[in-house]
Amino acid sequence: MSSKDMTTTPFGAHSTADDVVAGTDLRGKRAVITGGASGIGRETARALVSAGAEVTLAVRDLRAGEEAAGAIIAATGNPAVQAAKLDLADRATISAFTRTWTGPLDILVNNAGVMAIPDLDRTAEGWEQQFATNHLGHAELALGLHDALATAGSARVVQVASSAHLMGAVDFGDIHFEHRPYEAWSAYAQSKTAMILFTVALAKHWAGDGISANALHPGGIMTNLQRHLDDAQLAYVGAKDAHGTTLAVPPGWKTIEQGAATTVLLAASPHLKGITGRYFEDGNEAAVQPEPAPGKTGVAGYAIDPELAERLFVVTREHLSH
């Protein structure tokens, strides 16, 4: 794709969710946000609700979700916020959520996730936890909500991925670390690459239903996502100062309000009308990174390759058919 074909917007790295949603009327729109009880998921919800949307926080901890909903209502004056149980590593809760959803769905934000789980952990199905939670759980949710999204007419699916995908492709020969040694960051990178590939696949398969799908890197933001990092890792990524104090906003990182901006852009902005199958960062479509590596920007070619996307789509459906 040439640079002239890439989607650009007036927004950038320092834009906030409120900047992006300003002037946008979302009354009558319905949204589901996974992981909406805290961090950028909660801020995404607040921004959408402030513009008039009805939002369901799909959360693992229902009490935390209800507290977040109450706070959002108090902050915005819009009572159209609720919490619902959803554990992306528990297929029964995904099935229950999709089965009981009624009516159209305009916006699905797949935001929740886990990062750098230090030791190999598997779900009841034997799936590696990060791939299962970050990709497969969200994929099953999206597939289960397809009809609701199609009914909306111009629905959007937003996949919150990560620049960590630049650390590695999907190992189709051993996705669940059954033969290779487990490595936390390789597992995380693979799961985020899978989220982007699935975005490309959804854009292709669901184009006829009027559903767009786009992925993004939100930037570095201090949230609960860092809970599995030890002191050395926090120091390495610059989240601790020279005295060992964890910083609320490390140099070069974003505030939560800035971190939610690109998500809100893909979910609600008229700038993204008709755009699908793309990867964004800092409010704009990202260029292909010719030499993917940690700490770089852009999107890896292996994360947007249409053949790999189709392969991932097939593998995902095979996983979820059991």
Image (cartoon, rainbow, N blue to C red):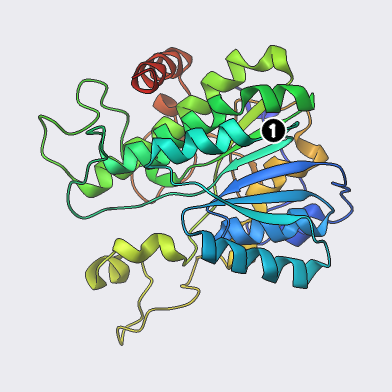
The answer, for residue 290, to whether it is visible in the render is no
Nearer to me, 258 or 75 = 75
Q: Position of residue 31 (x, y in %)?
A: 70, 43
Nearer to me, 259 or 134 = 134
Q: Position of residue 55 (x, y in %)?
A: 71, 50
Vertically, is 194 above or below 16? above
For disc 1, the neighbor class at 10 Å (few under 14, some 14 to 19, many from 20) is: many
For mark 1, give the secondary structure.
strand
Nearer to me, 283 or 54 = 54
- Left/right placement of residue 313 relative to residue 173 reads right
Count of numbered circles in the view: 1
Q: Position of residue 189 (x, y in %)?
A: 33, 41
Question: Residue shown at 77%/56% (left/top)?
Answer: 49
For the N terminus, the quadrant is top right
Question: Residue shown at 53%/47% (left/top)?
Answer: 111
Residue at the disc numbered 1: 156
Q: Amino acid at mark 1?
A: Arg
Question: Residue shown at 21%/55% (left/top)?
Answer: 118
